[in-house]
Amino acid sequence: MTDADVHLPDSEEPTVQFDHVTIENDNAPDECAIFPHGASEDELMTNWITAHDDSFVDLQSMR
């Protein structure tokens, strides 16, 4: 399977929506946890990612 096999046409909207929370840490950088919208407690145990402040880039700089 290639990326072309799973790429949605530009006219289709994504089917997954995400929520996020900011985790403020006293002795470490703050984190942003990203997870599927409406996920159950069981799903939240394995369906999430976290990112630190230096993980983000300006959208315009990547275009």
Image (tube, grey):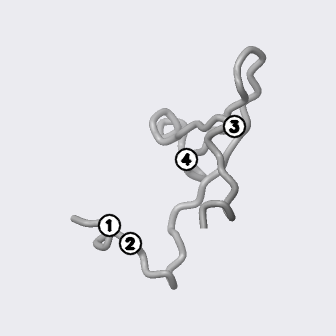
Q: Mark 2 touching mark 1, by CB under 8 A? A: yes
User: x, y (%) of residue 37?
Assistant: 60, 53
Q: Quadrant of the C terminus?
A: bottom right
For disc 2, the marked residue is 7
Depth order, front residue of 2/40:
2
Q: Secondary structure at mark 2?
A: loop
User: x, y (%) of residue 12?
Assistant: 50, 80
Q: Image point 74% across, 14% down: which residue?
A: 27
Q: Residues within 10 Å of mark 2 (few under 14, many from 20)?
A: few
Q: Secondary structure at mark 3?
A: helix
For disc 3, the marked residue is 53
Side of 5 relative to 62 (left or right): left
For disc 4, the marked residue is 39
Count up the numbered dots: 4
Q: Amino acid at mark 2?
A: His
For disc 1, the marked residue is 3
Specify which label sits upstream in the sequence, 3 or 1.
1
Question: How far apart, in angstroms, are the residues tagged by discs 4 and 3?
Answer: 24 Å
Depth order, front residue of 10/61:
61
Q: Mark 2 touching mark 4, by CB under 8 A? A: no
Depth order, front residue of 23/47:
23
Up-down relation of residue 53 to residue 19 (above or below)? above
Up-down relation of residue 26 to residue 5 (above or below)? above
